[in-house]
């Protein structure tokens, strides 16, 4: 389980994020949106194999056929702006959550804080996620760029899906070696 008080190294963040994105890419290819990507839903085995857990929200949404805009689904710290404003979520919503999670893996904290889950969720409508390198020293600029693109407030400006984000991350890994 992830979510340590201090951030992970760039290498550890790369390894975990790439594996989560591989699983998300497969889900997105199958037309599945997780809607609740967060460290608590990422499991790491003793051998370092990463799995995404808790697809229960996906099933609940499908079974309930939720259409009300007054219902916010997911964990406030990781919600995409469109999940806060409406019930619409697609692969780019999971990409946003991955960007927030990557920020947390690197810095040891989430990018927003608030007095309540609702206040926390609504911050993402007005504020951009900062670059991890602006919070802690030593984060390669290329990682900052991935986090910033993944967490763009406008979904059209994000990576299209888990595969697209993973491809960018692996290209950065090859570049940085």
Image (cartoon, rainbow, N blue to C red):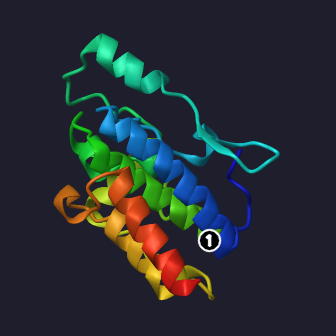
- Measuring from the top left, give residue 80's x and y in whole percent: 33, 50
Closer to us: 62 or 160: 160
Residue at point 41%, 72% (across, down): 146
Whether residue 116 appears in this view of the structure is no
Left or right of 160: which side holds 168? right
Residue that carries the numbered disc 1 in the rendered image: 107
Quadrant of the rendering where the C terminus is positioned: bottom right
- Measuring from the top left, give residue 66's x and y in whole percent: 25, 19
Left or right of 174: which side holds 90? left
Residue at point 21%, 37% (across, down): 88
Quadrant of the rendering where the N terminus is positioned: top right
Q: Residue furthest top?
A: 63
Left or right of 92: which side holds 100? right
Q: Secondary structure at mark 1?
A: helix
Image vertical order of residue 14 relative to residue 81, above or below: below
Residue at point 17%, 59% (across, down): 156
Image vertical order of residue 71 relative to residue 114, above or below: above
Residue at point 62%, 57% (across, down): 16
Closer to us: 98 or 123: 98
Whether residue 140 appears in this view of the structure is yes
Q: How many residues crowd mark 1 within 10 Å: few (<14), some (14–19), many (20+)? A: many
- Measuring from the top left, give residue 126's x and y in whole percent: 27, 64
The image shows a total of numbered marks equal to 1
- Measuring from the top left, give residue 64's x and y in whole percent: 30, 12
């Amino acid at each position: 389980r992830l979510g340590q008080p201090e951030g992970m190294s760039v290498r550890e963040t790369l390894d975990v994020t790439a594996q989560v994105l591989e699983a998300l890419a497969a889900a997105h290819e199958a037309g599945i949106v997780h809607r609740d990507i967060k460290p608590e839903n990422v499991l790491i085995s003793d051998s370092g194999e990463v799995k995404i857990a808790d697809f229960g929200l996906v099933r609940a949404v499908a079974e309930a056929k939720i259409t009300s805009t007054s219902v916010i689904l997911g964990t406030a710290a990781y919600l995409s702006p469109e999940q806060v404003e409406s019930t619409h979520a697609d692969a780019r919503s999971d990409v946003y959550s991955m960007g927030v999670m990557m920020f947390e893996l690197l810095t040891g904290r989430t990018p927003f804080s608030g007095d309540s889950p609702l206040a926390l969720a609504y911050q993402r409508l007005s504020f951009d996620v900062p670059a991890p390198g602006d919070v802690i020293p030593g984060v390669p600029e290329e990682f900052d760029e991935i986090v910033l693109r993944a967490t763009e407030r406008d979904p059209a400006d994000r990576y299209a899906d888990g595969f697209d984000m993973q491809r960018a991350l692996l290209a950065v890994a090859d570049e940085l070696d």
